[in-house]
Amino acid sequence: MIERIPQLILYGIFQGGIYGLLAMGLTLQYGVCRVLNITHGEFVMLGAMLTFTLSEGLGISPLVAAAIIGPLLFAIGFVLQLTLFKGLKDRAPSPPVFEGNALLAAFGLMYVITFIAQIGWGGVSVPSRYLNVRVSFLGMDFFLNQLIAFAIAVALGVAVYLFLNRSRLGRAIRATAEDPATAGLMGVNTNMVLAFCFGLGALLAGVAGTLISTLINARTGIGFGNTVIALIVVVLGGLGSVPGSFFAGIIIGIVSMLVVGFTEPVLTVPIYYAILMVLLLVKPAGLLGKR
Amino acid sequence: MGLFVLLLVFVVTFPLYARAYDVRVLTIVLVYVILAVSWAMFSGTTGYMSLAPAAFFGLGIYSMATLQNYLPFPVIIVTGGLVAFALALLIGLVTLRLRGIYFAIFTFGLVVFLGELVQYLEATIWLKHGQAIIPIDNEILLYTMFGLAVVTVLAIYFIRRSRYGLALQSIGGNEEAAEHMGINTTRLKVLIFAISSAFMGAAGVITAPNLIYVNANIAFSLFYSFMPILMAVFGGMGHLYGPIVGAVIFGYLEKMLRAQLYSYFMLGFGIILVAVIYFLPNGIAGLVPTLQDKLGGVIQKLRKGGQAGQHANT
């Protein structure tokens, strides 16, 4: 049993990179736009299923497909924020009311997107064939696609982090997250910034979906499970904290692999939830949260 | 009062002329009334959005499934309510110090957690997938559910009117201020949360026999969390009648649409939810004052016009 631990941890880190990517999108959307996007997992599912369509139908490699799917989902997210969520924000009497309404609207969207996907793809389960090559390294086995997915997830994570911290637009985003009213007075077009952030969140979800589709069999039903994981990771990392959610993703990845390796796979969600419960009690702001 | 007698007569005589299916529809509508009214009592007034109705409702369903062979039906109803009450008390003590969105996330997770936990228990300990429930006569279920709905609505009516109701509203308005006024906000929130959950649990027990077969996915479906919220928001939460109106309309719609176009129902539910939140954030009860304003203006104008006419005559 013990000798399996390094192997499981390695798998967990690989898995965790993707969880981190998932959660980064969600934390951006909540941290800046104040929309707790329950439909996040459906964007992941869309990413995975579109990858399948592009790679089967047109013979495009999944990595190239991600470059098409990302901007497409970005556009959908952008428009959603500009229309639906901006409208909700303008009508809500107070920020907490907006957060509640946005959550409910996102839940409604979840049904709409799932339904459209089910019409489009039916109940197909798509096998992952991309780079299914076994690699041995320091006595540990893994598949090449795991490594590539992890590398892309980390690269994207670092890119988003640098973008937020170094670029001009990134600074505008952080300013908007901190204090939208003042940011607006300082000449930031907050509506555009919010729309951009929501779009970026959707893009990250889509790319995570593409990566997931190279690892597991994608179905139209995978959305909700990913939403739950993203939520837990985001709370663990601190709502609104981008680096926090990435590290939390890796922690949850390792935990999930250890649980799958040593106990029942059905127990993973209850154990995530136990972690969440303890965390909310001890440090509700998360590992790297501010408050 | 007269309205209540009419309602009582309607429900009691309903099984005499309606089909068995319609009796079930009415029972489901009553379930939603209970869920929506109890949800609105806690979340509508305090602003803490609980996504947990499905957790307590599912707990009730599973109480019935596990206890049906050991205890008489009325005892199980009380037990289901107590189990939900106890869990809510625990959850409340743990979480109600959290503010805002964390509470929503926590209660959302609770539904998923309980579902997975039951699945795990079924797979490893009970060694069966899902459970059959012995059906009970439709009319008995209808009358029991009606009784519970009346108790729920009355209880909530009196809580709203009491000083606790006012205290709850002040928490919704400004929690810190409420605290400074000397309200023990945490205790009040936990207590009201637990009471509202008890009704949901009891409703789950009475619903179970209609389902005939349950598993974790059916009993702990998030649909039962969001449906009451949609109803309460649609009806408007400022008044007691708002969630009831919402529950009657959507409960009926759900049953009708599900039977006819099953897969499109989910699409419709999604679109309606988004549309209601977008266009009617204060519900139809919120429309009434606006309409009154507008109509009142028109009526006043007409009156003035009439008076002017009278003056002209004299």
Image (cartoon, coloured by chain):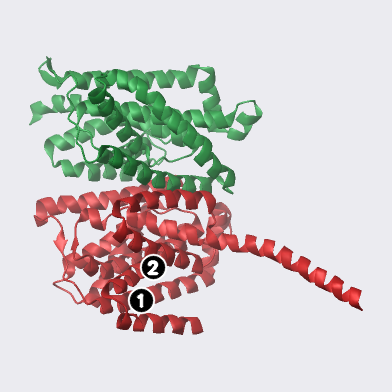
Chain colours: A green, B red
**Residue assigned mark 1:** B146
Above or below, A148 relative to A200: above
Say how many tags the image has: 2
Q: Residue B34 carries which label?
A: 2
Residue B202: where, in percent of width, then height? 31, 69
Mark 2 burial class by Cα count in 10 Å: few <14, some 14-19, many 20+:
many
Above or below, B89 relative to B9: above
Secondary structure beneath label 2: helix
Quadrant holding the N terminus of chain A: top left
Q: In this view, does A18 lie to the left or right of A85?
A: left
Q: Is residue A225 left or right of residue B32?
A: left
Residue A123: where, in percent of width, then height? 22, 41
Which residue is drawn at the image coordinates 21% and 54% (left, top)?
Answer: B216
Which residue is drawn at the image coordinates 90% and 73% (left, top)?
Answer: B312
Q: How far apart are marks 1 and 2 (CA)?
A: 9 Å
Residue A236 visible in the displayed image? no
The chain letter under disc 1 is: B
Which residue is drawn at the image coordinates 51% and 60% (left, top)?
Answer: B45
Kind of residue indicated by mark 2: Ile
Secondary structure beneath label 1: helix
Residue A24: where, in percent of width, then height? 38, 29
Query: In terms of depth relative to the viewer, which is nearer, A248 or B244?
Result: B244
The chain letter under disc 2 is: B
Q: Is residue B307 left or right of residue A129?
A: right
Residue B169 visible in the displayed image? yes
Above or below, A217 relative to B294: above
Residues under numbered marks 1 and 2 in contact, where contact means CB atoms less than 8 Å apart: no
Q: Are marks 1 and 2 on the same chain?
A: yes
